[in-house]
Image (cartoon, rainbow, N blue to C red):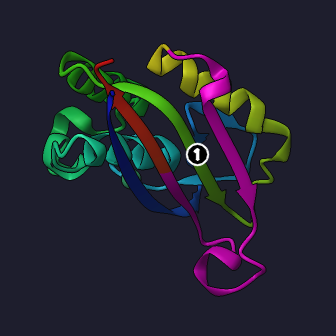
Amino acid sequence: MPDFRIGQGFDIHRLIAGRPCVIGGVTIPSDVGCDGHSDADPLLHAIIDALLGACALGDIGEHFPDTDPRWKDADSGKLLTHVAGLVYDRGWRVVNIDATVIAERPKLAAHKRNIAVRIAELLKIDPSKVSVKAKTHEKLDAVGRSEAVAVHCVVLMSRGE
Ligand code: MG
């Protein structure tokens, strides 16, 4: 029997004017983008934390401190491939990823498929293993006021036969 591990990730980033809006490694046309030290991609950050969590390898802040100038405006795709290398080197493989992006804006429905394909490409897995869902926050709280984008994500990993 293979060994299975589940990992959970969450992230939230403030939306501000004048930043590219990068979600799941895809730049979405938008008049606002996520603020943060790196490119501030909340979906890739949540996936990174889920992968690290499944394999008990710490969290994104330990691996990529936001005080480190190396990660200023960093491409989160590179952070994700680095973390994928860490878990793959330990024999873990992704069974599936299921993520929910919560945003009042930008609207993501038209981009969900591209985002899932991009995540699969970064992780070198089949796109059928990646689910990206999008919903609003029903105008409630900061996310509902379009002040932020939040992401919840779970990943299942397996190792061995
Ligand atoms: Mg983040």
Left or right side of 26 for 41: left
* Residue drawn at point x = 58 percent, y = 49 percent: 99
> What is the x, y in percent for residue 141?
62, 86
Q: Residue at x 56, y 47 (%)?
A: 19
Q: Which residue is at a point 46% across and 56% down the rendered structure image?
A: 35
Secondary structure under tag 1 reads strand
User: Disc 1 residue type?
Assistant: Asp
* Residue 103 on the magenta span: no
Position of 130 with respect to 59 (left or right) is: right
* Closer to us: 37 or 81: 81
Residue 55 spot, x, y in % from top left: 23, 40
Q: Quadrant of the N terminus?
A: top left
Left/right placement of residue 46 relative to residue 72 reads right
In the rendered image, residue 105, in percent from the top left (x then y), is placed at: 75, 60
Vertical relation: 161 (above or below) 156: above
Q: Residue at x 36, y 37 (%)?
A: 73
The quadrant holding residue 146 is bottom right
For residue 13, above or below residue 129 = below
Decide if residue 40 is in sight here: no
Mark 1 highlights which residue? 98
The residues colored magenta run: 125-153
Residue 139 in view in this figure: yes
Q: Position of residue 147 (x, y in %)?
A: 61, 72
Vertical relation: 130 (above or below) 153: above
